[in-house]
Image (cartoon, rainbow, N blue to C red):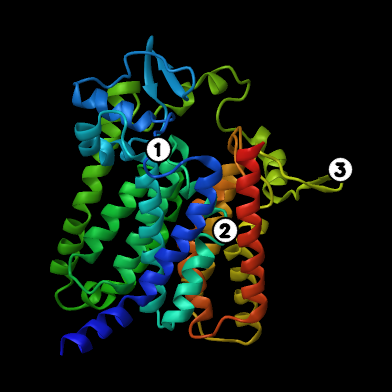
Amino acid sequence: MTKLSGGFVRRQYADIGAVVLCMLAAYAVIWCFNGCFPWAANSYNSYALQAQRWLQGHLDLGQDYSYLEIAVFGGRYFVSFPPFPSVVLLPFVLVFGTNTPDHLLCALAGIIGAVFLLKLAEGEGFSRRNSVFLALLATICGNFLFIATNGGVWFMAQTFAFALSAGALWCLRCCKARSAVCWSLFLWACAVGCRPLNAVYAPVLLYLVWLRNREELTGAQRGKAWNRLLLSCLPAAVMAAFYMTLNAARFGNVLEFGHNYLPEFTESTYGQFSTHYLAENVERLLRLPAWKDGKPDFPLFDGMAFWLVSPIFPVFLTSWLQSVFRREKTDGLLIGGTALLVVAHFLLLALHKTMGGWQFGNRYTVDAIPFLFLALLCVRRERTTGFVCAAWCLFTFALNVAGTVMAYLM
């Protein structure tokens, strides 16, 4: 009996094991070049410094750190990034001080996000083998690999947001518990506290909440159902209140988390966001690497063609067009709405003064992947993965490994 149960357990978790091992193998290759091993110290530890000051009863950093992106306001120095990762680091700061295991936490968040996507695909009816492939397509086969292998402040925020967004979608689509809506909205609120533009995808979450509770919300007991739904929003509302209170206490504005007070924006003619940046940044979203001295020359600042480094974007588009030509029945509102929100998200990114500092690929666009992943699942349904898709993903995996290694060696 023990032998049989052991075999069942191995089969039951083989898909998770496959995803974890593949991700760890890819991580290990990058770590050998960037030195961001799980036990290595992280110099770009803004969130740990902020968490330590919170524990000491202060909102500011107490001093300037010239190598970090520090907001200067009222003669004091603040972390200029959204605050949620510092909340996660609080217990670690109590144990390790500011030498928190940032690289390890970032790697674990990436793995957790991939497992959520894996289980989301299985919950949508895909085979375990195809689910493993799709989860890897959305993570290590794309530009996610670059951000998940470094615990620096910029990458930690993105990796945490990725995992939290994936968890929020899994809760709404796959979790059967009555508290699933509550957990989903809470996780999404936490993701927004890492990457504020994730708020763009609120309509996706609200639509999924409506699909999940439509019968109750329109039934005879709809009054009670709406009350339960409002109560489910309470944890997310608490997180929003925390962000706004913190922003107001630091900068006198409930919507200001500090980025506007970075010197690069305060000294800029047009500030942090402006239509003056739009045309140039749209070109950066689409630009291919140049060819120099007989080899590709990848830009390390302001990004490059997002579709070249993250295969989920062209795979989604081709799958969607294929389903339209075949006149397949799909949730057009969810698929089309998500696609429009991704476009809106990218246009907002293009209004920003920069498309990201030092990087390989176009890391800002990674934030859209969990939401586009669900849309892809709704398009493909039970269709198996073709050889062309697999070949493309193999190419992008090799490209991201080589490009990431190149970035660290330059």
- The image position of residue 2, as x and y in percent, is 16, 85
Placement of 185 over or under 244, stated as above or below: below
Q: Which amino acid type is marked by label 3?
A: Asp
- The image position of residue 384, as x and y in percent, is 54, 84
Query: Label 1 vs label 2: CA separation?
Result: 24 Å
The crowd level at tag 1 (other Cα within 10 Å; few <14, some 14-19, many 20+) is some
Q: Which mark is residue 152?
A: none
Q: Given contact means CB atoms under 8 Å apart, are the residues at marks 1 and 2 in contact?
A: no
Residue annotated with mark 1: 40
Q: Nearer the viewer, mark 2 or mark 3?
A: 3
Kindly tell me whether residue 16 is visible in this rendering: yes
Say whether disc 1 or disc 2 marks the residue closer to the N-terminus: 1
The number of callouts visible is 3
**Residue 46: quarter of image:** top left
Residue annotated with mark 3: 293
Q: Seen from this angle, which residue lies furthest top?
A: 75
Q: Which amino acid type is marked by label 2?
A: Gly
Query: Label 1 vs label 3: CA separation?
Result: 36 Å
Q: Secondary structure at mark 3?
A: loop
Residue 181 falls left or right of residue 320: left
Say whether disc 1 or disc 3 marks the residue closer to the N-terminus: 1
Residue annotated with mark 2: 142
Q: Seen from this angle, which residue lies furthest front?
A: 3
Residue 46 falls left or right of residue 231: right
**Residue 351: quarter of image:** top right
- The image position of residue 5, as x and y in percent, is 20, 85
